[in-house]
Structures are given as C-alpha cells and as structure tokens.
Image (spheres, rainbow, N blue to C red):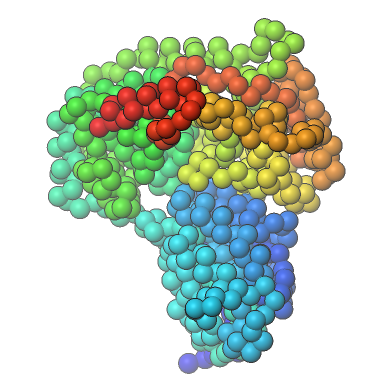
Amino acid sequence: MKTVRLTAAQALVRYLANQLTPEGVPFIAGVWAIFGHGNVAGLGEALYGVREELPTWRGQNEQSMAHAAIAYAKQLGRRRAMAVTSSIGPGAANMVTAAALAHVNRLPVLLIPGDVFANRGPDPVLQQLEDFGDGTLSVNDCFRPVSRYFDRISRPEHLLTALPRAFRTMTDPADCGPVTLAFCQDTQTEAYDYPESFFTPKVWPIRRPRPDEDELVRAIAAIKAAKQPVIVAGGGVHFSGATVTLKSFAEKHQIPVVETQAGKSALAWDEPMNFGPVGVTGAASANALCEAADLVIGVGTRFQDFTTGSWALFKNPSRKLLALNIQPYDSAKHEAIPLVADAKIGLELITEALGDHRFPSPDATLKADWFARADAVTAPPKDGNSLPTDMQVIGAVQRQSRDNTVVMCAAGTMPGELHQLWKAKLPLSYHMEYGFSCMGYEIAGGLGIKMAEPERDVIVMVGDGSYMMMNSELVTAVALERKLTVVITDNRGYGCINRLQMGTGGAEFNNLYAHTSHVKPPEIDFAAHAAAMGADARKVSTIVELEEALAEAREASNTRVIVIDTDPYPTPEAGGHWWDVAVPEVSDRQQVNAARAHYEAALKERQ
C-alpha cells in the first residue's frame, strides 16, 4: 500500500479538495476561516498550501461566516457546501448558533473548530473550558445536539473514518445537516502515513429513494378517496428539484398548492394552482383551502407550527394527513400516512398511478380576492407625509425587482409580510431562513446567496434590530466584490415582538426604544455606518425615493444600502392564522386577562 506522509491538517484539506459532486466540481466550495490559537498553525498552514484549489475566505465573525456558508448551500439546493474553521473557545462557541440554524433547516455545512490539546500537556490551555467532573469535555461539546454528525479528531488516523462519515451525512438527503469535526490543535500538526488511495477523487451522488410499495398503495388510495385535497409544498420540493414535477402534478389532477416559508417560489405566484402562502403568515386563499381540506398532502415539509397554525388550521373533522418526505421522522408526524421517498420520485409514481383522476377545480376567486388585498396594502401611500409601512416597502422592492431577483430575510416583521405579499416568479427566488428565525442571518446569508449564484440580483431585507445584531459581513461583501442591495427598515426597535407583546395583552415594554429604560434612546445613522464599511449608502424618506434608490442600485457595481424609517405598528389585516403563544393565566392587567380568555377559546379549536 502506497502512503504519503502528511500532517492531519494537510490530510484533511487534501481530502476536502478531492470530494466531488456528480457535476465533477468540489462539493466543498471553499473554507471560511478566522484564525486563532487552535487552528492557525495547523489548519492555517495546510489551507495556505491548497489555496489555489480550495479557496479560503476571511470573515468578520464565526457565526456570520457559517451563516454565509449555510445560505450558499441552501441557494444551491444542497448540491454544494462550504467549510468553516475557528479557534477554540469563543471562536468555536460563536458557531453553535449557526450550527443550530443548519440543523433545523437540514442544510449541509462542515464546521471545524479547533480544540484543546489531545495530549493534555499544557492543560488548561488558553480559552479551555474545564469541567470539574469530566476531563473529556471542551466548548466543542456544545455542538453535539446541533450537529447531524459530531466527531473529535484526537489522533491523525481518526480522519480515515471521520471524513467519509462527514460527507455521507452532508450528501444524504434524509440525514443532511451540519457536521462538526472538533480538531485538537496538537493533532492538526502531527504527521501520519496516509494511504494514497484515501485522496483519490470521489464523486458523492445525491440519492433519490423510491417509496415502499405498500406505503405507495396506501398513499394513492388516500388521494383517490379524498374530495377536497390540498398540497402543502415545503423546502423539500426545492431540494429534490421537483418544482416542475409539482406544477405538472397539480395541474393534471387539479389539486391546489399552498406554500410554506421554505417552499415559497416552488411555483410561480401566478400559476393557477398556486393559492399562496399557508399558515400563521399565510394568505386567506391558502388558509381557506386548508381549513376545508379532507386530505392534506405534505410534500417535503416538516409541518412546523407556523405552517399548521399550531395544528389549528386543518379544521375538517374527517381530515387526514399524507406526508411525502425523504426523512421518516417527518413523514410520521401527527399520525400522517407516511410516504418515505424523494419528492420528485414520489410525485411521479403517484401521478402515474392516478392516471386521469382529477378533482373539481378550486375556487379561483379565492386567489383573485387575496391578491387584490395584497396589492392594496403594498401600493404606494396616498399620504406622502406619513411613515411608510413595511408592506409599502415590500411593494416598492417588488416593483423594482426582476424575475432573477432573490429576496431574502430571516427574522422580525419582514418574514411574515414577505411570505404573505411577495410575488415570487422563479424557483429559489425567495430565500427565507424561518426554521430557526435567526436574527443576524440576513447580510451574511445574502453574501452566501451571491457567492452561490453571482448572476442573481440579491436584495436583503433587514430590520434595524437584526442589522444591529450582525452586520459585519457587509465589509466582506464589499471586499469580495459580491454586490448586494440591502434595504434597512428602521422602526426603532423590535417592532414584530412589540406587536406580539401587545397581541397577548402585554404592555409595550423593552422592545421599541421608546418603551425601554434607556435614558437616551439610540439615534443611529445606519447609512453612515454602512458607508463606513465600504458600501454605497443613502437614507430615503418616501416610497418614491426608495424606488428611485432601488433602480440606481440595480445598475450599480458596489454593494448598496438603502435606509428608510417605517411605522412599527401596521400589519396586513387580511390573511394569517392563530398561533399558539401562551398567555399568563393570572395577571393584574385587564388586557392580559382578555387575551387569556381568547387564548383558551382558540385552544378548543385545535384538533
């Protein structure tokens, strides 16, 4: 057996460079790195040696670097991924939130935090966590519950088994998610005689599992027995590349489609069978169909509470669930009829068996009425002196967008209103991280999208609160010349949670700056801040000015940031659904008691 003598770090990066997609390109597109003690001497030197074939990018924060990597993988439908390395201690701990985000959203990312000395010679090393009862623990053990696969590399030969397992996880559509390889810093520098065959280029195909025959028979029987079925399209439709298949299936059998946050843009907004967003942030058209449906067909959705209205949306007493999902865990939720399979394959087999079976046409006026309402709230304000709403900002961005525009967001007010109001034309033109709803994902995520698809026009929608949490990768976008258009809506605090607080009977408290204990509420010049990081930035006062700035940004080459003040209170009055947010049973405030009574009545409606 021929061997090659390499350090463990050199072996790791050589292996990464030789793991290929079916298209013949490296599955790991590159490595995000902030070097510190724990990865600079070992991995830093190794990455320098392969910098031509495996690029390394310097970010500003370990969490946001990982966010960029995760958004990259999502935008490419999990066909490629990135790696992220950090030092031990704070650098590693910073990535835990991003790992959780990737875990919830079932997205591949390879996290390589530095770890303590395997030989324990210098214990306790700088930044080392010392557990008084377990000498094997380090900060990196925090990654265990938020990783699909976790391993600690404390000997060079551990890579021979850990790396194939890591790639199996990241490329498996059922188990896909974050992988953490906690890499002991002394081990990174130790040499070992690795088999040359270990570095032979390898292609990792993405499998498409076919369903069990008995499950398929039961699924087809359930569809044939239904009278008012509806399809809930989730993110799995995108990951399976099943958007065209779903369109054909829905049209052939006349089954209306509603879309989750992750599934939105699976069908163009104006497709006749697309009845819009579903659930808490859904359209009246979609929710009306779901309330009446006797069979809810989930395709690639995990039936999150925002999708199901906390399981109060599906009101038909004879309602059944059919869950077509590649992950058995998701297909068995709430006593659903399971169909464990790839979404595209599953839909193809079902339609073949259904033949010419068609259902009555859904009521098209539901959709027409909804979009008439949506158009009304996104229209420019008639009163040019009042603060614009987030809905009107969305309308302005929509009017200035193109078919290839990707609009993206993650948390706050915008996700709900974008889900309801945005008219997505092409698949993957709507990028929302709403599985973990992680504030701070937006700008880093926008960068990841632009790196995945440089030809797309990427518009980042972010509130002032989320911008303040994490904005530093704006510098990186400028430095890498990955042009973004960032629209900051400044409602002077956390407007979304303020409304939720009021909606549950609470007093306005500690969300908007006007209702905090701050002696001097902040007055932040976001345009000046963004300009200081290299972006071209301006503040606008009206929707007309916003549209002018967006038109200019579309033709610009540098990242543009546009700031606009908005009213924190209005939301769309139509659409939406109840969401289970527990209200205190006991309170001295009449508003809380009234909200509790409403809450208890709503609980009785849940089946």
Q: Quadrant of residue 46?
A: bottom right
Q: Nearer the viewer, residue 544 or 428?
A: 544
- For the point 26% across and 22% down, the residue is 292
* Residue 592 horizontal/vertical position (percent): 46, 26
Residue 89 visible in image? yes
- For the point 66% across and 64% down, the residue is 91
Residue 171 visible in image? no
* Residue 449 horizontal/vertical position (percent): 61, 45
Q: Quadrant of residue 594?
A: top left
* Residue 454 horizontal/vertical position (percent): 66, 45
Q: Quadrant of residue 114?
A: bottom right
* Residue 537 horizontal/vertical position (percent): 81, 34
**Residue situated furthest front in the rendering:** 588
- For the point 43% across and 71% down, the residue is 165
**Residue situated furthest top in the rendering:** 382
Quadrant location, the C terminus: top left
Q: Nearer the viewer, residue 393 or 585?
A: 585
Please tell me whether residue 514 is drawn above or below residue 127 in the rendered image: above
- Residue 503 appears left or right of 469: left
Please tell me whether residue 205 is drawn above or below residue 358 in the rendered image: below
- Residue 18 appears left or right of 578: right
Please tell me whether residue 352 is drawn above or below residue 102 in the rendered image: above
Q: Nearer the viewer, residue 448 or 145?
A: 145
